[in-house]
């Protein structure tokens, strides 16, 4: 399935129905009073998060959403029917922007969370409401209020706990495939991963966390090089960053610096996220080199880099639990900051 994470749509709430102008007609009553009914309300446009959706693909094909207009009022004080609401379903994690002002309207982060994005127009009052002692036969009624229209930009940002960051071909997808049940495409060339993969890592029967593997980053990604930038915004929301560096690279320190810099350029807040570093493909190195790598100092904030191999499972369990510990720390920090 194609992964679409941005879509633009047009929505319009229903117009209110017009109020009616009419007069009572009864036998033997020459001049009946006004009896024009009120118009109905226009339908609302509602957007709701749905956990069973994971892409905005539907909105590549259908982009116009109109709620029903309210009916006009009728004779004999009959009110017009209200227009039907229209509901637009989006994946959990969808942010809704006003496409014209770029203002964030709302962020749907929980399943079934919904928002009335455009409220239907009010119906007009019929002439039955306007009779006064001085004007017993008002010949006017209110028009309905038009329903507002909006151009919206929907942006899906995955809500994973851990985001995997790394250059292309370093083994990110292979790693997610060994720590979770995700089955991403793996191949020995850069840019194998074209859309993000989500995996769930089980800690025990009841506890788990989610991990997102996104396409590899390259130098200049924050300015749009490669595929990375398109997906960096998914990483923006993760709680923990897991850097995967290729242990066979000529200059691991430089690799880490480049990645760090790209993240910082994209969004300086990324610097404050908890991070962990692992060195992949260590099964391909001799003991001595691996030994030397354990002493590598990259970033005091990230702790000691973990030597791993997704092929031999070296330290894969340690990695799972270390990430879990970091998530618990994150939770604790969050609770502390709230109390
Ligand atoms: N020997 C060895 N090879 C690995 C290991 N992890 C990944 N590989 C190989 O490295 C290559 C790239 O792996 P991927 O998992 O596709 O790498 P990626 O980082 O997801 O790559 P992109 O999606 O292109 O960014 C594949 O040929 C893998 O089989 C490992 O721990 N040891
Ligand atoms: Mg990949």
Image (spheres, helix red, strand yellow):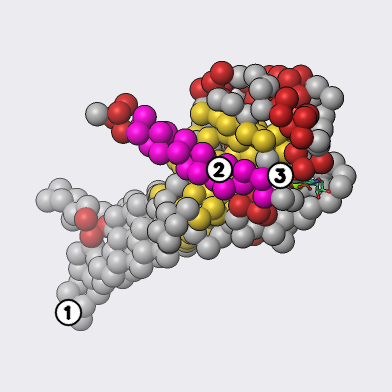
Foreground of the two, 90 or 192: 192
State if disc 3 and disc 1 touch (CB < 8 Å): no
Q: Position of residue 191 (x, y in %)?
A: 82, 43
Q: Secondary structure at mark 2?
A: helix
Query: What distance separates the C-alpha of mark 3 from that of mark 2?
Result: 12 Å
Report the predominant secondary structure element of the magenta stretch.
Answer: helix
Q: Compared to 328, does 5 lie above or below?
A: below
Q: Is residue 327 left or right of residue 98?
A: left
Query: What distance separates the C-alpha of mark 2 from that of mark 1?
Result: 94 Å
Is residue 183 visible to us here? yes
Which of the image's four quarters has the C terminus?
Answer: top left
Q: Secondary structure at mark 1?
A: loop
Is the residue at mark 2 in contact range of ligand 1, meaning its CB lies under 8 Å from it?
no
State if disc 2 and disc 3 touch (CB < 8 Å): no
- Residue at left 66%, top 22%? 295
Query: Residue tagged by mark 3?
Result: 309
Q: Is residue 222 left or right of residue 65?
A: right
Which of the image's four quarters has the N terminus?
Answer: bottom right
Query: Residue tagged by mark 2?
Result: 318
Q: Position of residue 38 (x, y in %)?
A: 30, 60
Question: Which of the two labelled residues, at mark 3 and mark 2, occupies the earlier sequence position?
Answer: 3
Farthest residue, direction front: 288
Q: Residue 168: which quarter of the image? A: top right
Q: Residue 18: which quarter of the image? A: bottom left
Label 3, residues with CA under 10 Å away: few <14, some 14-19, many ≥20? many
Query: Residue tagged by mark 1?
Result: 28
Q: Position of residue 138 (x, y in %)?
A: 26, 54
Q: Secondary structure at mark 3?
A: loop
């Amino acid at each position: 399935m194609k992964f679409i994470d941005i879509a633009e749509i047009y929505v319009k709430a229903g117009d209110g129905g017009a109020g009616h102008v009419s007069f009572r007609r009864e036998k033997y009553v020459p001049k009946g009073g006004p009896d024009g009914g009120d118009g109905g309300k226009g339908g609302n446009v509602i957007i709701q998060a749905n956990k069973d959706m994971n892409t905005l693909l539907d909105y590549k094909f259908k982009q116009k959403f109109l709620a029903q207009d309210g009916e006009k009022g009728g004779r004999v004080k009959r009110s017009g029917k209200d227009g039907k609401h229209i509901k637009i379903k989006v994946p959990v994690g969808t942010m809704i922007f006003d496409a014209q002002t770029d203002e964030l309207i709302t962020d749907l982060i929980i399943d079934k969370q919904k928002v009335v994005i455009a409220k239907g127009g009010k119906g007009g009052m019929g002439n039955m409401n306007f009779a006064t002692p001085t004007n017993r036969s008002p010949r006017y009624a209110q028009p309905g209020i038009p329903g507002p229209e909006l151009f919206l930009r929907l942006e899906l940002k995955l809500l994973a706990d851990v985001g995997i960051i790394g250059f292309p071909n370093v083994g990110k997808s292979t790693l997610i495939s060994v720590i979770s049940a995700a089955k991403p495409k793996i191949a020995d060339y850069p840019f194998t991963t074209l859309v993000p993969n989500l995996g769930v890592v089980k800690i025990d029967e009841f506890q788990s966390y989610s991990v997102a593997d996104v396409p590899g980053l390259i130098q200049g990604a924050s300015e749009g090089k490669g595929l990375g930038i398109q997906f960096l915004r998914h990483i923006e929301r993760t709680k923990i960053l897991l850097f995967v560096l290729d242990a066979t690279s000529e200059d691991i320190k430089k690799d880490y610096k480049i990645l760090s810099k790209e993240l910082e350029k994209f969004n300086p807040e990324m610097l404050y996220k908890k991070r962990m570093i692992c060195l992949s493909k260590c099964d391909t190195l001799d003991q001595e080199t691996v030994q030397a790598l354990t002493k590598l100092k990259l970033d005091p904030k990230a702790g000691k880099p973990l030597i791993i191999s997704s092929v031999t499972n070296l330290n894969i369990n340690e990695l799972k639990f270390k990430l879990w510990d970091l998530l618990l720390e994150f939770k604790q920090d969050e609770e502390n900051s709230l109390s």
